[in-house]
Amino acid sequence: GQNIDQPTEMTATEGAIVQINCTYQTSGFNGLFWYQQHAGEAPTFLSYNVLDGLEEKGRFSSFLSRSKGYSYLLLKELQMKDSASYLCAVRDTVTGGGNKLTFGTGTQLKVEL
Amino acid sequence: KAGVTQTPRYLIKTRGQQVTLSCSPISGHRSVSWYQQTPGQGLQFLFEYFSETQRNKGNFPGRFSGRQFSNSRSEMNVSTLELGDSALYLCASSLDSSGYGYTFGSGTRLTVV
């Protein structure tokens, strides 16, 4: 099985940088996703890391260390619209292949003026 | 191109009834997964279908079932509804087993009274 930990809440200031950490203990690992979810809406894909290292996409970057069971999502130049829940999810290794994700409980980010 | 479409968006049912939810994946996507999201448990994997076959299954009781049609559209059925089944039900589709392009629909909000 999988156990995924991420902070419950974080607060940051508009224009600043925030790092959301995610640690996982797994019996199998086949990639790590980050999703953004605004209240009442569907999760929106942000990043997918399979190999170690940093992936940058505009204001968002994601880092993965498989040996440490650790990932982080970095958000730069924070905007008010970035206030949302950020979900870390591990893609399990499953017999016969396939897509089965285990999610953390999410980090609620509040961006303030 | 059109995203993942889930119908209906909202549903109110009575305890003991059954319900069927529908998911139309992105055109060309063959994998459809279903998740339940509740405030207490977060997002939990229900099952995945690929080419009309259930490929993976989560830890939910047998009251939760699904199927996939030849056009990749999928339905999820919950029988003998309980109050605890009240949740946002999300489906996600992807092209194949790689995990890339894993996209969620807007969900069906089910309320059991």
Image (cartoon, coloured by chain):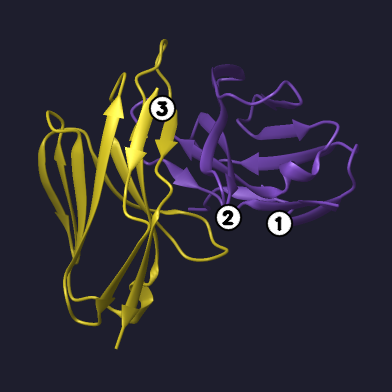
Chain colours: A yellow, B purple
Secondary structure found at label 3:
loop
Secondary structure found at label 2:
loop
Query: The C terminus of chain A is located in which quarter?
Result: bottom left
Q: Earlier in the sequence, mark 3 or mark 2?
A: 3
Three-letter amino acid code at the position of disc 3:
Asp
Q: Chain of mark 3?
A: B
Vertical relation: B44 (above or below) B9: above
Q: Which mark is residue B96?
A: 3
Please check whether the numbered discs 2 and 1 fall on a single chain.
yes
Farthest residue in the bottom direction? A113
- Crowdedness near tag 3: few (<14), some (14–19) or many (≥20) residues, C-alpha within 10 Å: some
Disc 3 or disc 2, which is closer to the eye? 2
Residue in the picture at 17% in, 77% down: A16
Three-letter amino acid code at the position of disc 1:
Arg
Answer with left or right where residue B45 lies relative to residue A111.
right
Vertical relation: A101 (above or below) A5: above
Q: CA distance from mark 3 to mark 1?
A: 26 Å
Query: The N terminus of chain A is located in which quarter?
Result: top left
Q: CA distance from mark 2 to mark 1?
A: 8 Å
Q: Is residue B26 visible?
A: no
Three-letter amino acid code at the position of disc 2:
Ser
Q: Estimate the x, y position of residue B82 in percent, counting from the top left.
A: 81, 39
Secondary structure found at label 1:
loop
Answer with left or right where residue A33 lies relative to residue B46.
left
Q: CA distance from mark 3 to mark 2?
A: 21 Å
Residue in the picture at 79% in, 45% down: B83
